[in-house]
């Protein structure tokens, strides 16, 4: 497994090139180019603010920022998942013709989406300044949170990209799972709205830590408790290692099924 | 492994699972699991106990029929497939050309693709940077390097693919069939580049149907049949052994690779006969060539159309007559039968040619059976002294 990781490191140039390709293809022939990454969350936020604070009368100050802090990492997670499900299958031609460590395909999606995620944080901070919300020093933790998010998402992406080669109907299942996961995670609602009797159950949801921490440091401006941080780091590493281990064990079979 | 070897293949076998019943989806798997039904499969050995040692600086050719396992062997050597048993050791850097331009992304420009595919082949950015001009020059794409490759002609596409694979500057180069594509000037360029490689003492492994280029290029050949290595040695000897097997019918093309059609009529066999009625695949320019197509119609078929076609080794479509176009109408066929197509005087020049045979319905749109390029025949010049081009046209010179 270590040798495999080292080999992956040797192909970092390819990984970099694939990430560049993903980004280039996404913005090719669009006039606004990379601006879309920043405009998208803004548009979404405007819509959500109107719906939630004017129609559903959700009584909370700066609800838009609150929402965006959860939605941005969530979008990263869900887009990466749905894109990486097909990542091996859509590169079947290449896998059949050239020897490459196959993990580069889901990983290139993880990294190119991360570029977008980081870019979309910019309009969030601009908005906060605009709405006179003080940005606390707790935001210094963001790099760690992003790393957790990458590791967690990469683990699941590696797992499902490989699984989808063996069971092609997994694409459909993942859509259902992702939708359910969205509502089961405090993204459009705050953590303290969860009834006390379900609190224990919610604490089993790893995304509570991975995504919840973003809201803690950006919106509430506080450093999450030690145990909260440890949970989120542990969850991220466990996910990555399980996903990577499964991928590594089954990678060699992929070529016979693709 | 000793130092003078480039590749040592030790007792390598590859087995595939051949599924008779397989659950393709999670849902099916779950249901079948509950029902206690398991996937049904058997193992198919694509390669069995292959031992090959290739010395540094050698150019070797691997030949065999379609389905013999030669492409599997190449994929194992190129590390695309993991051998089920045995192991392969390497001395030096490897580059494989299984398909030219396999990794090209249509929307990206030539330049962007050079960087992307260079990385796929394991080159670093500085490596590619250094070789960029050389690649562009070889591919003759100076003017087109900044347009998306989807706008490239197939020739440009292949030139770029070839230029990239050789730019890796590998110690061991693996080539699959790709020399059979492209126009003549491209082929000449490739051969020139390969010769340069040979002179630099690099190791080249070629898989090809084109026995002539194997004979010309290689100093050793291996013949694979049904996953086993059955002959190795000097290309001339191995190739003549191979041709012998084919003419004796010991290598049968039982699985026609490019077979299409509904199957109401099956072509059973296609054979070539010379003017004295002997089965052969070898002819001289000017000879009579008789093709006999044996078929079996499982039910009465009205107004079938039989068609044939000849292609040159590099894919040029030479002719394609059929019974309808020739005004040779067939009322119906039923059961066993045979049809002959006779070329009175073969005007093809020296080379090897593909032969295709098909039976269509009267509209010529639905094939009952279609063997695309399933047979080869070889033409020698015989008493003709011309040597250029595809055709010999009986002619004379006159001074006036």
Image (cartoon, rainbow, N blue to C red):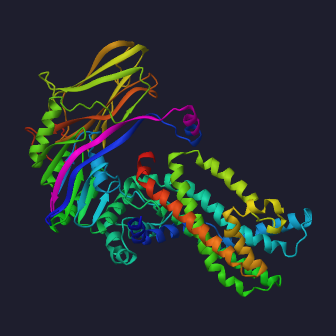
Q: How many marks?
A: 0
Residue A5 in view (yes/no): yes
Residue at image position (51%, 32%) is B37
Left or right of B216, for residue A122: right
Residue at image position (50%, 62%) is A244
Query: Which residue is outermost to the left?
Result: B383
Given residues B137 and B299, the one toward you in this image is: B299
Residue B127 at x, y percent in the picture: 35, 76
- The picture quadrant where one finds residue A22 is bottom right
The magenta stretch spans residue B53: yes
- The picture quadrant where one finds residue B262 is top left
Q: Which residues are magenta?
A: B30-58
Residue A99, placed above or below residue B367: below
Residue B158 at x, y percent in the picture: 35, 58
The quarter of the picture where the N terminus of chain B appears is bottom left
Residue at image position (30%, 15%) is B337
Residue B325 at x, y percent in the picture: 37, 25
Left or right of B290, for residue A212: right
Residue A76, placed above or below residue A256: below
The magenta stretch spans residue B224: no
The quarter of the picture where the C terminus of chain B appears is top left
Given residues A42 and B36, the one toward you in this image is: B36
Given residues A146 and B295, the one toward you in this image is: A146
Residue A67, placed above or below residue B87: below
Residue A255, placed above or below residue B262: below
Left or right of A110, for residue A99: left
Residue A100 at x, y percent in the picture: 40, 61
């Amino acid at each position: 497994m270590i040798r495999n990781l080292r080999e992956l490191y040797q192909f970092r140039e390819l990984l970099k090139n694939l990430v560049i390709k993903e980004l280039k293809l996404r913005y090719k022939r669009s006039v606004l180019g990379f601006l879309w990454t920043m405009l998208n969350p803004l548009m979404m936020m405007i819509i959500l603010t109107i719906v939630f604070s004017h129609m559903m009368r959700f009584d909370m100050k700066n609800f838009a920022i609150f929402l965006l802090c959860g939605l941005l990492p969530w979008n990263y997670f869900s887009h990466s998942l749905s894109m990486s499900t097909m990542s091996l299958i859509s590169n079947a031609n290449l896998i059949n013709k050239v020897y490459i460590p196959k993990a580069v395909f889901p990983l290139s999606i993880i990294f190119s989406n991360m570029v977008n995620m980081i870019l979309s944080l910019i309009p969030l901070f601009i908005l906060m300044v605009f709405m006179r919300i003080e940005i606390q020093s707790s935001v210094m933790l963001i790099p760690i949170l992003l790393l957790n998010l990458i590791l967690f998402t990469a683990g699941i992406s590696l797992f499902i990209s490989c699984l989808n080669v063996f069971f092609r109907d997994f694409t459909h299942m993942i859509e259902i799972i992702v939708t359910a996961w969205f509502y089961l995670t405090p993204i459009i609602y705050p953590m303290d709205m969860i009834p006390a009797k379900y609190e224990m159950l919610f604490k089993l949801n790893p995304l509570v830590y991975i995504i919840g921490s973003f809201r803690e440091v950006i919106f509430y401006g506080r450093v999450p408790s030690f145990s909260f941080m440890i949970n989120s780091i542990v969850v991220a590493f466990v996910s990555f290692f399980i996903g990577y281990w499964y991928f590594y064990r089954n990678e060699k079979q992929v070529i016979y099924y693709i | 492994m000793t130092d003078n070897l480039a590749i040592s293949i030790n007792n390598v076998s590859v087995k595939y699972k051949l599924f008779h019943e397989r659950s393709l989806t999670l849902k099916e798997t779950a249901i079948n699991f509950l029902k206690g039904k398991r996937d049904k499969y058997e193992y198919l050995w694509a390669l069995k106990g292959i031992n090959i040692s290739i010395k540094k600086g050698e150019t070797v050719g691997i030949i065999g029929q379609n389905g013999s396992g030669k492409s599997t062997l190449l994929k194992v050597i190129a590390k695309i497939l993991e051998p089920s048993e045995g192991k392969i050791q390497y001395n030096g850097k490897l580059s494989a050309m299984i398909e030219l331009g396999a990794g090209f992304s249509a929307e990206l420009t030539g330049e962007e693709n050079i960087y992307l595919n260079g990385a796929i082949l394991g080159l670093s950015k500085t490596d590619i940077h250094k070789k960029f001009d050389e690649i562009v020059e070889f591919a003759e794409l100076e003017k087109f390097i900044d347009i998306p490759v989807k706008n490239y002609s197939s020739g440009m596409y292949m030139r770029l693919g070839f230029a990239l694979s050789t730019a890796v500057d590998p110690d061991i180069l693996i080539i699959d069939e790709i020399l059979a594509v492209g126009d003549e000037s491209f082929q000449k360029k490739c051969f020139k580049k390969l010769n340069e490689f040979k002179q630099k003492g690099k190791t080249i492994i070629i898989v090809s149907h084109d026995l002539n280029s194997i004979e010309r290029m290689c100093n050793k050949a291996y013949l694979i049949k049904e996953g086993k290595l059955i002959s190795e040695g000097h290309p001339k000897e191995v190739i003549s052994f191979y041709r012998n097997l084919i003419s004796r019918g010991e290598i049968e093309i039982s699985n026609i690779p490019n077979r299409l059609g509904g199957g109401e009529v099956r072509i059973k066999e296609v054979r070539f006969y010379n003017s004295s009625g002997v089965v052969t695949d070898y002819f001289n320019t000017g000879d009579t060539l008789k093709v006999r197509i044996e078929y079996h119609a499982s039910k009465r078929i009205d107004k079938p159309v039989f068609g044939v076609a000849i292609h040159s080794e590099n894919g040029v479509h030479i002719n394609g007559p059929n019974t309808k176009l020739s005004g040779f109408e067939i009322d119906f066929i039923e059961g066993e039968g045979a049809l002959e197509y006779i070329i009175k005087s073969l005007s093809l020049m020296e080379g090897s040619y593909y032969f295709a045979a098909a039976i269509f319905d009267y509209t010529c749109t639905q094939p009952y059976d279609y063997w695309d390029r399933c047979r080869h025949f070889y033409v020698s010049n015989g008493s003709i002294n011309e040597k250029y081009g595809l055709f010999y046209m009986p002619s004379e010179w006159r001074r006036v």
